[in-house]
Amino acid sequence: MSSSMFNNNSISISVSDDDSDELGRMRVRVRRKRKKQHNRLIKNKELAHRLLRFLLKYWMLLILFVAVGLLLFEASRITKTPRLDVKSEHDAKRTPHLKGDLKAVEPKNLDRLDPPRCLKLLPNEELQHLDIPMHDEISGAIKNVVYISDKDTQQHRGKSNTTLSGLRTEVTRFNLFTGDQTLEQRERSFKVSDTAELHCGFYSDNGGFKISDEDKGYMQTCKAVVSTCAFGGGDDLYQPIGMSDTSLQKVCYVAFWDEITLAAQESKGRKVGEYHFIGKWRIVVVRDLPFTDQRLNGKIPKMLGHRLFPNAKYSIWVDSKSQFRRDPLGVLEALLWRSNSVLAISLHGARSSVYEEAVAVVKKHKATPEEVEVQLSQYRRDGLPEDKRFNGKKALNEASIIVREHTPLTNLFMCLWFNEVVRFTSRDQLSFPYVLWRLKLLKDINMFPVCIRKDLVNSMGHIGKAKPLTN
């Protein structure tokens, strides 16, 4: 081996033919890979351009499809039926006197107890400790209310008792339940004195609205009551919800039915239990209703609760088309005690004037034009103004909920209101502002807005037309 080979500074690497071919193939693969990536980029750009052109062309249809989908989703949520009020069944099983049949008591969703928006109730822990205040002293201008009966008439006139049909005529709805109030007596009933004397239903023992002695005994135990009625089979019975255990123990729940409603409910499987209860409601069956007009019969428990519950200090009236869903003692505290009111009633949601309401009553065929005109003509003669507000308050009410303390003044007001409904039309919205205007002393009224009424009840609506009684 020659020494010149070690003195050479360069290093030579020999490359075989096989190595050269392999390197070429690698270069070709790299070029192909780059070409494929380039082609893919071009295709992606074309696809994006096509999609953009499609969106620009059909964007309105896409928005429409999305809107329809959202509407269908919301509709499916609304039509879902939540479970029934399990607490009501539990309470009925736990409390012996609530053994009424709870099957089919609630036909649909009746457990909607969303938090109130406008009604400011006390916290639950405070509601549990509420009690019913019982005032011994009577304050106010009216100290006592005396109810005229046929016994007074017999003593003064020496007349014998008459029959129920003997006092009915074609031109008046006065009968032996109401007594035959003359216009002179009507005018005198608005004159305020320490002792007010006036007609207020239950005029004669032969006047109808018969309640069993057992039911009367129960009703006399009530210090506070939530009441409703369904006459003529026109409505179902909705179980109250949202009450505290304290209210359940201290407040009566009484539903007045006639025999037509009793039969209609039993045909649907809603039978009254052995203790006269269905769920939380004590069912009081009234016999011999005094009026052929079932709406007028319904005004008796609505307006004359102080006569039906002689020892009750407070009452809450709820129309049969509604489900009461708040704690009753909490409602009394919020609407009466907190504001020092003796009467709370829901305002009318649509109108403010008696005369506007009269037009609506005729238009909706709630009363005939002739009988409405008779009522308005009398009110105009008496000087009822066309103002929409009395004493700074909206006068027209909706009256599906009435919360009140049973004082001589509120009892007088309710009697006067009932007499107006009997004398004229059954639409009590027309007569309420008039009585409020005539009875100047009643000022402690809480006329609460529609928002609170919606917090108090779930409105179910009437399920059918009440069957009228025949003569």
Image (cartoon, helix red, strand yellow):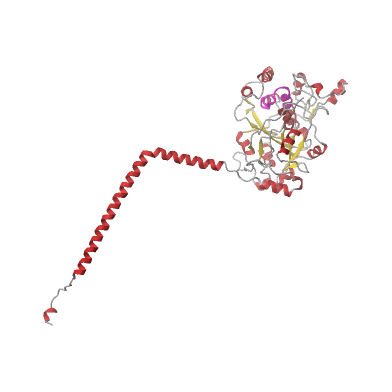
Q: Quadrant of the C terminus?
A: top right
Residue 365 percent location from the top left of the image:
64, 24
Is residue 168 shown left or right of residue 59?
right
In magenta, the rendered stretch is 417-435
Q: Relative to 127, does residue 207 appear above or below in the rendering?
A: above
Q: Write down the quadrant of residue 414 in the picture.
A: top right
In the picture, residue 372 is in which quadrant?
Answer: top right
> Which residue is rendered at x = 75% and y = 39% of the image?
283
Q: Percent x, y for residue 127?
A: 68, 45
Horizontally, residue 7 falls left or right of residue 213, namely: left
Q: Nearer the viewer, residue 22 or 94?
A: 22
Quick one: 394 or 466, which is closer to the camera? 466
Q: Residue at x 80, y 32 (%)?
A: 210
User: Measured along the vertical axis of the image, is residue 348 above or below residue 156?
Assistant: below
Tell me if I can see residue 59 in this picture: yes
Q: Can the viewer see residue 226 in this picture?
A: no
Q: Is residue 424 magenta?
A: yes
Q: Is residue 372 magenta?
A: no
Position in image of residue 333 (x %, y %): 68, 40
Estimate the x, y position of residue 140 in percent, counting from the top left.
Answer: 74, 31
Q: Residue at x 53, y 40 (%)?
A: 75
Q: Main secondary structure of the magenta part?
A: helix
Q: Quadrant of the N terminus?
A: bottom left
| Figure quadrant of residue 308 | top right
Front-most of residues 396 and 138: 396
Count of numbered badges drawn on the protein: 0
